Image: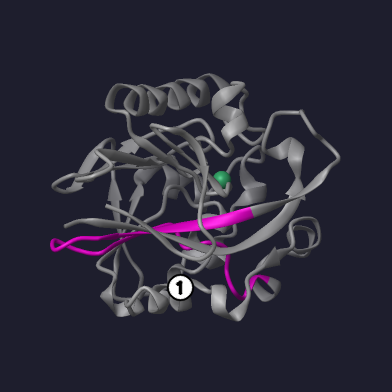
Amino acid sequence: MRKLHVLPVGHEMGDKGALTLLKGSGKVVEIPYTCYLIEDDQGNILVDTSSSVRWKQLHPPDLVKSWPVYIGEDERPDRMLEKEGFSTKDIDYVVNTHLHYDHCGNNAMFPDAKFLVQEDEVSHATYPGWWEASSYVRKVFDVSGLDYRLIRGDTELIPGVTLIRTPGHTEGHQSVVVELERSRVAVIAGDAIYLPDNYEDPILPGIYVDARRYGQSMQRIRDIIERRKGTLLLTHSKMYLSPGGWQKLKKGAQTFT
Ligand SMILES: [Zn+2]
């Protein structure tokens, strides 16, 4: 049976106004990082790799200062995988929802995996415009030897696991739709939705390249969740939406089937 493991991998501290457009600006909050492991007979898929454990060396000084990262030794993605019974070599695919530093920071830990990223996300991350440059750190994703497979548009990766385009936060952002037995369907939103507030209010997140497409992508996810009575999983929140309402994730790893 396919299993979806939730892996909390540290956090950063940052301005609340970046999460809910203008609302709460000036207030520094804890922003959790969450990675997801899809365990399947047809391949183990890791969705996102958090911020680099070497962030102090690799991030530019401004970023180090304004967005400090906290990843304890036992919270590293490789340690979290170990706790769930996997080594980094067991990962067949890594899906980066997008290439902001806090979603691909530890790609270098997976030299044996195939990386699935939207083609336009790679081009914008590699040669960003001024309006999108501050959240990309080329050193953490442009690592020699990593096997990037560029994809265009919605793509079924293995039967029942589909990458869907959800642009707006970044040019080539994607989310992951996972068919499950007990939970019906889960959507791993990435940064297409940051917090329950964005979904409920609704309110746009504060970091985007295209507000209109962001709104459309949020709606696309909402349609799937509502139509299928699915589970909505976020990167930067300790809450998830189940058919029974918003629930708190357990401390440590948690599994959906
Ligand atoms: Zn992002």
* Quadrant, the N terminus: bottom left
Answer with the quarter of the image where residue 37 lies.
Answer: bottom left
- Which residue does the image show at 75% across and 36% down from the upper left? 17
Residue tagged 1: 80
Q: What percent of the width, then of the height, locates residue 36?
A: 40, 57
Whether residue 22 sits left or right of residue 168 in the image: it is right
Crowding near the residue tagged with mark 1, few <14, some 14–19, many ≥20 C-alpha atoms within 10 Å: many
Q: What percent of the width, then of the height, locates residue 234?
A: 49, 44
Q: What percent of the width, then of the height, locates residue 226?
A: 36, 23
Q: How is the image coloured?
A: one colour
Q: Nearer the viewer, residue 239 or 128?
A: 239
Q: Nearer the viewer, residue 131 or 91?
A: 91
Q: Which residues are magenta?
A: 32-55
- Which residue does the image show at 42% across and 48% down from the upper left? 97
The three-letter code of the residue at mark 1 reads Met
Q: What percent of the width, then of the height, locates residue 235?
A: 52, 49
Q: Does the closest atom of ligand 1 sit within 8 Å of the Cβ of label 1?
A: no
Residue 17 visible in the shown view: yes
Relative height, residue 123 to residue 93 (above, below): above
Give the quadrant of ligand 1. Answer: top right
User: Regarding mark 1 in the picture, which secondary structure is present there?
Assistant: helix
Examine the structure image and report whether residue 18 is included in the region drawn in magenta. no
Give the number of callouts: 1
Examine the structure image and report whether residue 39 is included in the region drawn in magenta. yes
Answer with the quarter of the image where residue 202 lies.
Answer: top right
